Image (tube, coloured by chain):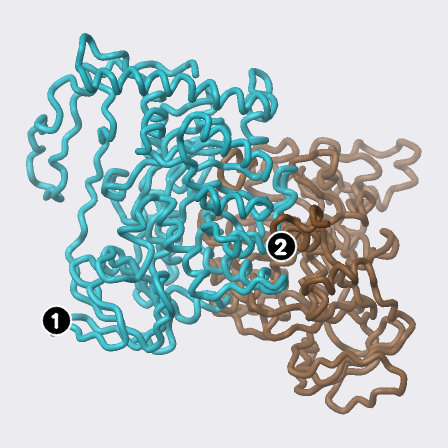
């Protein structure tokens, strides 16, 4: 989008209010290594049915109990969630958080590797994450506790990671890396290919060469193999893909391109994830039969290119009905680093267009955790899982609902964002910074 | 202000006004109507000239009573259990007890909401049409930093599939603007979202034109190699254009008054700018930063024109008191921001803060997807305002979507509220439009049924969609 359409191109209850906020700037209660009990709320574990008047018990950053009859130990910090809704922290599967600060300022964008003829399989996108990014706070203040950080561009864009939005260092934030190898197929003519069939052949050649390389590393080191289609580091990075240990996440929209991806997966025996999936509803049965998950938005209905003519807002509901593992991502995947937070509204819109409410919540919590391979730690409220928990004033998908508490690994993490500080400053005229 | 070729328009025929009535397909082509302007009058720079007149005709419609519905009027308090009568294209009655004529269609609105048609004062539908690509990229004439001579309507493709999607989301009127690559991008056009083979068939009859201006990063980026390449270069560019425009206006106003000698040379760009100076064209100024908006206000004062609305205005909240004082509206997103330096300070409560300061707040889209959810954008801004202690009622917020953009377009006497005598542009929502679960059930435009969610066979499908875009029921 250039020069015209859309440009070349939070909170807690009392603490967000008035002066109380100024006093709590950057004060993060250290509740780690403590026991926290969230009591009295309507608890949505996602891994099981909702619990009225439930308790979630947290110890040392992990969930230790979830249920209607959980005894709260003496000395536990209590969060009264009476009348509130309690869910797992939300997971936005496709973002550039931490590697794309201001999109129009290239020095702050680290999502796209130069690569070699469009191949950047060895590119670990997470190594460029800036934990000081101002875009983390708006997301976590509104209930997003983990995100996929996804490289873009090229034929093979690189390796993605899942991070938890804890304040701290990159090491603190990493949940799992890599979680997928990211590639493009179809309309995206990045990386030197000028036709879909050529992209298909190149992807297949790369995967086959990675397999050959993995069997012949010693000969390769002695220069006793035929030339391979990629550099050593890229072949090495593709080995887990061909061995079935790392999924290949393909940005692909057109129905026939999705079918091509399914053929590629069969012919090369790799696990694939479809992302984008504008026309995925047209091939939903095939995706379900192949057990291929789809990462899709619920607000996409403009035939913006010839690859997305079939875009429609019923897609999430249609995929779910067909039995496809479906992940919702909102519109935060591209330029909208600000709006990774809007994931919950995508879920709401998906419900308005036919998805069941429980399925929508699952599509922004447990299903992305499963698809990205981190469900053993996040995405549901079960004993043993990380205590990534959100307490909402009501239905999380509704605009009027406030976030009251966000815990990541058992710690309260809500802090005023830059935007919160700006709003406080300019709430009155003259602005607060000019006041005596 | 170079590059504007004065049209040797003496040989251009005067446009027909005979198309006011739909013409049967079999009828012979009508004789050219030359009664409106004398031959050769196209060479004359006339204020309020209308060379591409609207051919839109209010369709015949059956009287319709929507009753037992919650009405957000944008003119007064919410009416619960209300009724609204649409007749002959107008809102004929509003209240809690309205009697319908015997032949009226009666719609029961139990549990539903009725609002005025949504108005988006910032759209590029038609000029950046789907499915995109260079062939349909007609929104930015990036050949000169000042292209006041271009008119957005000459780029509008009426078969853009974005039009029916906007209508199905409750948008009944949209201002189509040129892009923001130029200091002065050209004339806008106000359209009714109706199927038509020509843009003239969509043009809102009698609507004023707008002028697109743009601040900041876009023009200086686009023209980095030839200038302007800086913000100070931008400002010099606007001022140079207005200096020429003022001289042009004086020359023509004098000639129009005395008809002494040959008319001055006509210049399309200066003609548009002169019409701004005469108050006949409304200025829509793309501008993100507070400091730049303040400078644009001073430029407007220097040359004696008014800015009708600042668009995007992600920092409008910083100068909301000044916008209120100057009578300038702010056309805003709730939460689009951060993607470039001048957008970094966007805050979600912007609309609520601007509104609370007494300025006219408007939810705009600049985007065909956001355009379908202007109500949701308003709801986000309401909630964000709430969190800093600014309470916005639904009666206030509905104005952000309706009567305030109507004012920005100079059409608040005709559209933007549910009041007797206004055009019958109304939307029936399945639920409170500020809920994420609300969907548009029906839309009436000038009293005629324009969209009915329950009847897919009746939906507007553009020519482009035939054979290209799948139908919900299967097939294309």
The answer to whether mark 1 and mark 2 are in CB contact below 8 A is no
Vertical placement of residue A222 versus A148, above or below: above
Q: Position of residue B267 (x, y in %)?
A: 32, 17
- Report the Cα–Cα distance between label 1 and label 2: 53 Å
Tag 2 subunit: A
Vertical placement of residue A196 versus B298, above or below: below
Residue beneath disc 2: A427
- Taking the spot 40% from the left edge, 42% from the top edge, the residue there is B125
Q: Position of residue B280 (x, y in %)?
A: 30, 33
Q: Nearer the viewer, mark 1 or mark 2?
A: 2
Between A220 and B431, the one nearer to me in the picture: B431
Mark yes or no: residue A187 visible: yes
Residue at disc 2, secondary structure: loop
Vertical placement of residue B471 versus A153, above or below: below
Q: Position of residue A279 (x, y in %)?
A: 50, 54
Q: Chain in cyan?
A: B
Q: Chain in brown?
A: A
Residue beneath disc 1: B103
Left/right placement of residue B238 relative to residue B33 reads right
Between A401 and A365, the one nearer to me in the picture: A401
Q: Callout 2: few (<14), some (14-19), or many (20+) C-alpha neighbours within 10 Å?
A: many
- Taking the spot 59% from the left edge, 54% from the top edge, the residue there is B348
Residue at disc 1, secondary structure: loop
Q: How many marks?
A: 2
């Amino acid at each position: 989008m250039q020069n015209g359409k859309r440009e070349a191109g939070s909170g807690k209850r009392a603490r967000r209010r008035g002066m109380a906020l100024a006093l709590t700037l950057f004060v993060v209660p250290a509740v780690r290594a403590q026991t926290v009990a969230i009591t009295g709320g309507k608890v949505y574990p996602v891994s099981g049915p909702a619990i009225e008047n439930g308790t979630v018990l947290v110890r040392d950053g992990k969930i230790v109990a979830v249920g209607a009859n959980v005894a709260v130990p003496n000395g536990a910090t209590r969060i009264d969630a009476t009348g509130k809704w309690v869910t797992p922290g939300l997971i936005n599967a496709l973002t550039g958080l931490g590697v794309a600060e201001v999109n129009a300022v290239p020095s702050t964008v680290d999502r796209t590797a130069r690569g070699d003829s469009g191949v950047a399989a060895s590119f670990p996108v997470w190594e460029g994450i800036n934990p000081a990014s101002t875009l983390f706070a708006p997301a976590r203040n509104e209930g997003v506790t983990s995100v996929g950080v996804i490289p873009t561009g090229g034929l093979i864009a690189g390796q993605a990671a899942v991070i938890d939005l804890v304040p701290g260092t990159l090491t603190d934030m990493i949940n799992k890396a890599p979680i997928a190898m990211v590639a493009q197929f179809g309309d995206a003519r990045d990386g030197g290919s000028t036709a879909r069939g050529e992209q298909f052949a190149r992807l297949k050649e790369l995967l086959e060469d990675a397999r050959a390389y993995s069997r012949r590393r010693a000969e390769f080191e002695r220069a006793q193999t035929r030339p391979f289609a990629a550099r050593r580091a890229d072949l090495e990075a593709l080995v887990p893909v061909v061995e079935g240990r790392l999924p290949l996440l393909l940005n692909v929209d057109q129905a026939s391109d999705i079918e091509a991806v399914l053929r590629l997966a069969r012919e090369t025996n790799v696990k694939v994830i479809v992302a984008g999936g504008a026309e995925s509803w047209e091939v939903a049965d095939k995706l379900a039969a192949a057990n291929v998950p789809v990462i899709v938005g619920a607000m996409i209905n403009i035939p913006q290119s010839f690859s997305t003519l079939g875009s429609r807002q019923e897609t999430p509901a249609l995929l779910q009905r067909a039995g496809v593992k479906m992940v919702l991502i909102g519109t935060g995947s591209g330029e909208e680093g600000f709006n990774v937070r809007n994931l919950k509204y995508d879920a709401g819109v998906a419900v308005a267009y036919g998805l069941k409410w429980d399925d929508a919540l699952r599509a922004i919590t447990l299903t992305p955790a499963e698809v990205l391979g981190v469900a053993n730690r996040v995405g549901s409220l079960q004993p043993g899982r990380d205590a990534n928990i959100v307490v909402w004033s009501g239905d999380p998908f509704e605009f009027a609902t406030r976030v009251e508490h966000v815990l990541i690994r058992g710690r309260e993490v809500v802090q005023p964002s830059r935007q919160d500080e700006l709003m406080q400053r300019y709430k009155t005229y003259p602005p607060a910074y000019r006041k005596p | 202000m170079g590059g504007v070729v004065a049209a040797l328009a003496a040989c251009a025929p005067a446009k027909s006004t005979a198309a006011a009535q739909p013409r049967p397909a079999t009828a012979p082509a009508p004789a050219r109507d030359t009664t409106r302007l004398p031959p050769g009058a196209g060479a004359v720079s006339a204020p309020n000239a209308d060379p591409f007149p609207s051919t839109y005709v209010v369709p015949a419609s059956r009287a319709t009573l929507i009753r037992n519905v919650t009405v957000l009027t944008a003119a007064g308090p919410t009416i619960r259990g209300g009724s609204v009568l649409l007749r002959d294209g107008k809102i004929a009655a509003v209240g809690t007890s309205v009697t319908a004529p015997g032949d009226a269609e009666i719609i029961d609105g139990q549990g539903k909401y009725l609002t005025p048609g949504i108005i988006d004062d910032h759209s590029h539908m038609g000029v950046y049409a789907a499915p995109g690509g260079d062939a349909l990229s007609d929104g930015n004439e990036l050949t000169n930093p000042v292209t006041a001579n271009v008119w957005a309507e000459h780029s509008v493709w009426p078969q853009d599939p974005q039009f029916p999607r906007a209508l199905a989301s409750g948008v009944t009127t949209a201002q189509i603007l040129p892009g923001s690559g130029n200091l002065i991008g050209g004339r806008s056009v106000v359209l009714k979202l109706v199927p038509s083979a020509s843009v003239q068939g969509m043009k809102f009859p009698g609507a004023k034109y707008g002028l697109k201006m743009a601040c900041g990063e876009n023009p200086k980026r686009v023209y980095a190699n030839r200038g302007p390449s800086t913000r100070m270069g931008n400002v010099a560019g606007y001022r140079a254009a207005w200096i020429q425009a003022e001289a042009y206006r004086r020359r023509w106003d004098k000639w129009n008054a005395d008809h002494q000698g040959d008319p001055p040379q006509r210049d399309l760009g200066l003609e548009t700018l002169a019409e701004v100076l005469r108050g006949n064209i409304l200025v829509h100024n793309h501008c993100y930063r507070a400091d730049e908006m303040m400078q644009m206000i001073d430029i407007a004062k220097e040359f004696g024109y008014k800015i009708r609305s600042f668009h995007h205005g992600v920092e409008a909240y910083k100068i909301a008191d000044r916008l209120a004082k100057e009578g300038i509206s702010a056309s805003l997103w709730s939460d689009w921001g951060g993607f470039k330096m001048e957008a970094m300070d966007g805050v979600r409560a912007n609309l609520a803060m601007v509104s609370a300061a007494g300025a006219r707040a408007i939810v705009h889209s600049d985007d065909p997807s956001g355009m379908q959810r202007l109500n949701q954008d308003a709801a986000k801004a309401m909630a964000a305002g709430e969190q800093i202690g600014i309470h916005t009622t639904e009666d206030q917020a509905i104005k952000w979507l309706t009567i305030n953009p109507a004012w920005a377009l100079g059409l608040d006497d005709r559209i933007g509220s549910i009041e007797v005598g206004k055009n019958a542009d109304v939307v029936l929502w399945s639920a409170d439009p500020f809920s994420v679960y609300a969907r548009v059930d029906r839309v009436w435009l000038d009293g005629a049924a324009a969209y009915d969610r329950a009847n897919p066979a009746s939906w507007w499908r553009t020519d482009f969609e035939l054979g290209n875009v799948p139908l919900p029921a299967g097939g294309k």
